[in-house]
Each structure stands twice: as structure tokens, then as C-alpha cells.
Image (spheres, helix red, strand yellow):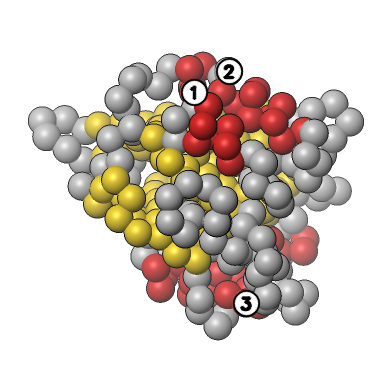
Amino acid sequence: MDVRILSYNIHRAIGVDRRFRLERIAQILAHYNADIVLLQEVDVGAPRSRELNLARELAELGDYPYYAVGLNVKLRKGMYGNATLSRYPIARERNIDLTLDGRKARGCLFTELELPSEPSASLLPVFNLHLGLSFKERPQQVGRLVRTPEFVGIEAGQPCLVAGDFNDWWTRIAPLFTEALGFVCATNHGVGYQNAFLTYPSFSPTTGLDKVFCRGPITVLGGRRCRLRVSKVASDHLPVIVDLQI
């Protein structure tokens, strides 16, 4: 079956013009109509975003019947973290804490999605993460992730996705997935990981922080970054869109 994935750091729906405009994010999501949407920096109950649950709002606007939220950062009022919107039922979910001592809170939202297949539904593990800003913490966070029961429990030959904002400025984390863990980078020009789609900053991108990795019986049909004009101002990141055959 064919599945479209979109990964997007929405920056709380506050654009580079410093305006909160959730409708811009919704417009971008509607244009690409992905089956699975992986969002980072999603506010819930924060005054700067009108105290809305942005995951729920975007799920309703995009007609996504299923969504999950993993909140990591506490604010004076409200929190923010990662959210996954899905056309497919969510069989299981857990927010995995990737926070290191003395560092900003970080997390990875794990969901297991029920894909339609015969004779019964097949399960797709999806890891939606936002790694730290320091190079020293990111390898430790990946190490913590791959030791979780959710990751260790993935059966050989089972499809799996890891995506989100890796904050991988110098493309040093990507080889951990492609070389050590057997993933394919779906957000790269050509084979490999060294020519990533440029996504940051959105108005004139110079680096590829936002990535999608896949493993198992998955064929990458194509991938790209968003080129809609509104995306240059809607967030400080551009979303990446990947079409897969599972």
C-alpha cells in the first residue's frame, strides 16, 4: 500500500512574522493531504497560542480521525511537544522521555498504527522525535531511544519509521540510522544521507534538520520539501513530504 508522510516543526504556529496563525499550518497540511502527519513544537494550553490544543485543532481541520500528543516542555501555563495525526487507528502510544540532565526537555512520541491489510491489520511503529540542540546530547538521545522496549520490540522485517526535527546541523546523526541501524533516509537528494532536503530557516534554508528514516519492507517512491509560498512564513522550518510503498 502507498502511504504519504509529512514531518513538520510548526514552531507553535507562530510564523517568522511573529504572528500566531494556525490557519497557515492547516493550509499546508491540507495541500499535501498526508496519511500520517508528524509535528513538533505543538502547544497545548499555552497563552501564546490562545490556550488551544493545537494537535486537536489541526486534526479537526485536516479531518484526521486519530491523533496523539507527547508533551515535553512545561511553560508557566501550558506545555508543548510532539503530535502525530493519522488516517489510521492508533493501537498503542507512549511518550518517550529523551531529556538529559541539565538540558532542555526533549521527547519522542511513539505510536503504533493499524494499517489496513488482508487478512488482518498490520502494525506500523512510528517514532516522532525532536532532538536537542547540542551535538553531545543528540547521540545520547538516539542511544536512549533505541534501547526502549518499543524500539527493541520491533520484529525483524517489520516496517518502521523514525522522523522529526533531528537538529542535525552537520549531518552527524544520520549515519547512526543509515550505517548502524539499517535505515534508509527518505529526505535526501539521491542515495545516502549527505545531501538532505534543506528545511531551515524556512525563508532561506541552508541546512536539513527535518528528516524521515524508514526500515523494513518499505520502498521510497519520492520525497521533497514544501515549496508553497505560505510555508516561508508559517514556521521557521519547512515540512518534508515522503511517499512510501509499504
Provide the residue designation for mark 3.
232
Relative to 195, say whether 29 is above or below: below
Q: Which residue is drawn at 33% across and 32% down?
A: 216
**Label 2 Cα crowd, 10 Å radius (few <14 / some 14-19 / many 20+):** few
Q: Do the residues labelled 3 and 1 touch (CB within 8 Å)?
A: no
Label 1, label 2: how far apart the Cα atoms are: 7 Å
Badge 3 element:
helix
Label 3, label 1: how far apart the Cα atoms are: 34 Å
Q: Are marks 1 and 2 in contact (CB under 8 Å)?
A: yes
Label 2, label 3: how far apart the Cα atoms are: 37 Å
Residue farthest to the bottom, as pictured: 229
**Label 1 Cα crowd, 10 Å radius (few <14 / some 14-19 / many 20+):** some
Q: Residue at x 45, y 64 (%)?
A: 224
Residue 94 position in % (x across, y down): 54, 29
Query: Which residue is nearer to you in this view: 184 or 210?
Result: 184
Name the quadrant containing residue 140.
top right
**Label 3 Cα crowd, 10 Å radius (few <14 / some 14-19 / many 20+):** many
Q: Which mark is residue 151?
A: 1
Asked if residue 93 can be seen in this view, the reply is: no
Name the quadrant containing residue 96.
top right
Could you tell whether 203 is left or right of 38 in the image?
right
